[in-house]
């Protein structure tokens, strides 16, 4: 019983961190474009929309996370606690860094890690999910790029649009589509906190989406400010109309994915859409910004990190296989040490040649 209560507490903690991270992927466009200039108001709108999305449309993705990645028969309270702890720890670290991390990638990575440890995976379903992790962001970038070029042509042909003559209706449009994007965040992300509990039979789907949606909303409202600032202000500047195009892209793609029960990386959808608009504005120079490089690296690392964490925790607390844990720890230390050494050598070489030490 203690393990069950602990798993529920960790799930609620994870839900709040999902809200904190998901804020950047849902309402940051309305905030960054100036449609909702006050951060507190933007986060409140985000929270309400996330809760409604979770309650009204979150059940299909919950079923996918709970039973379509690994057999639900291996999901007991202890295993669910491992999955949620791995996901929560990964996401908490990312939130401290202010990086808009994909909660779907983290949660799926944690579930897959458990499946690897038990040698029980629905590989075909996993491959479909991972494929859409690539397809959906690429589609978002392409759609946003087309939107951006179309907006440039529109503003060139009708200068009044660019000069702010139609700002009021455009502002309303951006707020509406921003709300819909946050709604889609609730639909897709509530499964990341509730799915493992539902799969283990700890809570029903209805209870999972209601309570999970509430705590994700609270996380967005009270903890989402830093990630909101990162996604809304630090990648590229954009107009109201461009902001509406980005939110529309995210809302359409994520709602469609949620209807079919696909957990997709919402932050990647929004961030790649923002990059698509930036590419339409400024060309390939947008890819040189360090914030984008940082986000891309975390996207790659996040599912692997959560997979290794959950796998290692299963080996410690379920299999009591200390030897495997020692190997994992050693590999991690060796990898970090190699990367650190390579970085040090690179810096030394740069200093050497800058001081005329080269040939």
Image: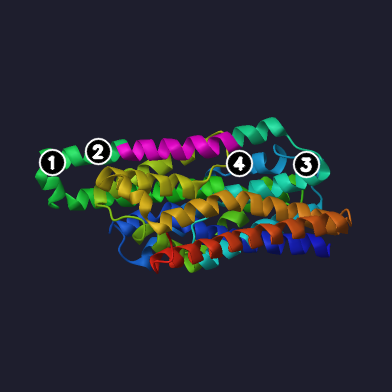
- What segment carries the magenta color? 130-145
Mark 2 vs 1: CB contact within 8 A = no
- Image quadrant in which the C terminus is located: bottom left
User: In the figure, residue 44 lies in which quadrant?
Assistant: bottom left
Residue placed under numbered mark 4 in the picture = 61
Q: Where residue 39 appears, x then y in whole percent?
A: 37, 66
Inspect the magenta stretch and tell me whether residue 301 lies in it: no
User: In the figure, residue 337 lies in which quadrant?
Assistant: bottom right
Residue placed under numbered mark 2 in the picture = 149
Which of discs 4 and 2 lies nearer the camera? The answer is 2
Question: Distance from label 4 to label 1 (Cα)?
Answer: 42 Å
Residue placed under numbered mark 1 in the picture = 156
Which of discs 3 and 1 lies nearer the camera? The answer is 1
Residue placed under numbered mark 3 in the picture = 72
* Residue 18 in view (yes/no): yes
Question: Distance from label 3 to label 2 (Cα)?
Answer: 47 Å
């Amino acid at each position: 019983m203690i393990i069950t209560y602990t798993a529920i507490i960790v799930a609620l903690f994870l839900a709040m961190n999902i809200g904190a991270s998901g804020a950047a992927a849902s309402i940051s466009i309305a905030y960054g474009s100036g449609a909702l200039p006050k951060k507190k108001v933007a986060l409140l709108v985000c929270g309400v929309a996330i809760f409604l999305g979770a309650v009204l449309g979150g059940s299909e993705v919950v079923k996918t996370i709970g039973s379509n990645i690994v057999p639900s028969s291996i999901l007991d309270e202890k295993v669910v606690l491992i999955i949620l702890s791995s996901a929560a720890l990964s996401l908490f670290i990312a939130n401290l860094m202010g990086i808009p991390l994909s909660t779907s990638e983290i949660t799926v990575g944690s579930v897959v890690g458990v499946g690897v440890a038990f040698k029980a995976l629905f590989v075909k379903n996993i491959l479909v999910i991972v494929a859409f992790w690539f397809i959906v962001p690429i589609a978002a970038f392409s759609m946003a790029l087309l939107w951006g070029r179309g907006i440039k042509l529109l503003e060139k042909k009708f200068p009044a649009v660019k000069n702010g003559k139609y700002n009021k209706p455009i502002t309303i449009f951006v707020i509406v589509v921003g709300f819909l994007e946050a709604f889609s965040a609730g639909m897709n992300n509530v499964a990341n906190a509730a799915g493992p509990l539902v799969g283990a039979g700890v809570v029903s789907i209805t209870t999972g989406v209601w309570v999970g949606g509430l705590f994700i909303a609270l996380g967005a409202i009270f903890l989402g400010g830093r990630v909101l600032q990162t996604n809304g202000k630090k990648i590229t500047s954009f107009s109201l109309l461009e902001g509406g195009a980005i939110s529309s892209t995210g809302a359409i793609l994520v709602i469609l994915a949620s209807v079919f029960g696909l957990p997709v990386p919402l932050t990647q959808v929004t961030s790649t859409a923002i990059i698509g608009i930036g590419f339409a504005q400024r060309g390939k120079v947008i890819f040189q910004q360090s914030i984008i490089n940082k986000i891309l690296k975390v996207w790659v690392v996040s599912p692997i990190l959560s997979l290794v964490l959950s796998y290692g925790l299963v080996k410690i607390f379920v299999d009591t296989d200390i030897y495997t844990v020692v190997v994992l720890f050693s590999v991690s230390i060796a990898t970090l040490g190699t990367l650190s050494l390579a970085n040090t050598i690179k810096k030394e070489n740069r200093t050497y040649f800058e001081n005329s030490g080269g040939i």
